[in-house]
Image: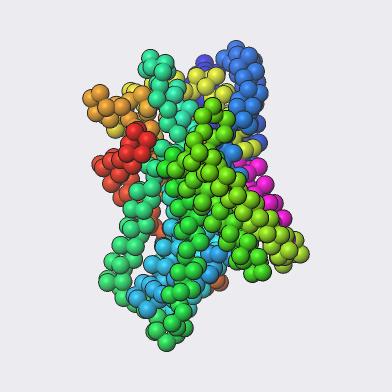
Amino acid sequence: MEFLQSTEFLTLAMFLFTCGFLIAGFPVAFTLSGAALAFALFSITLDHFDFSILTAFPQRIFTVMTNEVLVAVPLFVFMGVTLERSKVAEELLDNMGRMFGALRGGLGYSVFIVGALLAASTGIVGATVVTMGLLSLPTMIRRGYDKQLACGSIAASGTLGQIIPPSIVLVLLGDQLAVAYQEAQYKMGNFAPDTVSVNDLFAGALFPGLILVGMYMLYQVLITFIRPGAAPAIPKEELGIDENLFKRTLQSLIAPVVLIVAVLGSILGGLASPTEAAAVGAVGAMMLAGHRLHASGGMPILLGGASMIGLLVLTWMVDLRMQRDEIEVFEWFAISAAIVLSLGLLWGIWVSLHGLIVEKVENGNSILAEVSRATMEISSMVFVILVGASLFSLVFRGLGGDVLIEDFLHSLPGGTIAAFLVVMAVMFFLGFFLDFLEIIFIVVPIVSPILLQMEVAPDVPMSPVWLGVMMAVNLQTSFLTPPFGFALFYLRGVAPDEITTMDIYKGVMPFVGIQLMSLVLFWHFTGISTWLPEVLFGK
């Protein structure tokens, strides 16, 4: 009876109680905050919790709402939804399918390539899986592709938005790791710690994301050799190939690639923070959608796009700040050019907005209204969950849960390796039942400060960038793991009637295996994750 009233039992019970209600389908944010508040009040009656701890909750909410890094979330969401609603992916996927269709497994290759491009330009798993499920899956089945291979390819390529930057997952994970790394440094006695930012995590995740795409495509190549009938080539006469195909493909490819380079290049080049780059991406996506949907506004929008690129180049080459004592003549010319380019950009934005307002969808609303509504819904969900998770984390720590987990991980035989494997296994298991948001906001703040105090080798501390990439790949796997992987639900919702749920489950299992193999690869070769951040940012 005494154990049932101990803080250890209360901590464990709160965690299990919360997971149980989440699995049962209760709203995430209210489950997190409700369970935390209920256990806090109950623990106060047992004199195991100090009520004054709850007074820190308003400050936590204020910190979340004033965090400039998190402003990138609605901007990236807006960027992704805009590209999805403007049918840019449809055009790209259709042209890619025609180019690669004559090869065995060609439709699969096009799915992976387009999935990687959409991941780098949208970062929204649901939109990518649904788009490619609607467009590619019926075509692949009609062309004789193995059902399981087709389902697995589409679901896996859709989850690339988790790991390929710019990704909402990396933004949220980077924000949590920044706080965890600072906390770990303080506990180790370093009161002037280095910082880790979302930029570092973006740079660290770039090569692992591209390697995952390569591993997916190698698997497709292997299947075409072992079982040629699983991914047959399409006769050229049925593909509708003409002399303009390459030109159309190039045209559909240029705009998304330029947008990706502008957003990711400005971050990795140190020109912009993730929030500023997300704003560039949102404006670029808006102009790209406006150009595609509003043909009469083509020239002003192209001028606006060129102006935005010109501004990025000028920012990179010249100091455009006007609040300085000394400004050289050349810099005045550059500042004047920047003002002219800004006017061109504003013209392109105005014409794009007009096109998105004029263009209507099936329900009669404008595309801009639908994009704004979807952006608001997704962003609100993320931030409400974040607020609920803040209260959960506060109560969990108030009950001594962080100390309990720290003692457990330090007591494991095998040291750092055992602790890391246990944490990754728990995250993988929770991925069967919980969304990545719950895992990021509940698990990461608790275990990351503990892991970041450990050494992977004598006098070699664990890299926060490497830890973040490993967690991101693990979270990506959670989208594919049956029975509750979200990518599976998205695909099930748009799959043709002849596709069974078991086809989807069996189809993703090889890709789950590839994900686990990639984790082993990144474990043994940490430089894959840490080399680029060290070169770009010295970390």
Residue 377 within the magenta-colored segment of the rendering = yes
Vertical side of 410 occupied by 509: above or below = below
Residue 136 place in picture, x, y as percent: 49, 70
Which of the 4 quarters of the picture holds residue 276?
top right
Q: Can residue 485 be seen here? A: no
Residue located farthest toward the left when viewing the structure as drawn? 458
Vertical side of 473 occupied by 501: above or below = below
**224 or 193, nearer to the observer:** 193
Residue 41 place in picture, x, y as percent: 65, 20
**361 or 150, nearer to the observer:** 361
**235 or 199, nearer to the observer:** 199
Residue located farthest toward the bottom when viewing the structure as drawn? 237
Residue 134 place in picture, x, y as percent: 55, 68
Which of the 4 quarters of the picture holds residue 65?
top right
| Main secondary structure type of the part rendered in magenta | helix
x 52%, y 18%: residue: 6
Residue 138 within the magenta-colored segment of the rendering = no
Which of the 4 quarters of the picture holds residue 539?
top left
Residue located farthest toward the right when viewing the structure as drawn? 364
Left or right: 118 with respect to 493?
left
x 45%, y 43%: residue: 316
Q: Can residue 34 be seen here? A: yes
Q: Which stretch did the figure color magenta?
A: 366-382
x 24%, y 28%: residue: 457
x 51%, y 52%: residue: 309
Residue 481 place in picture, x, y as percent: 44, 52
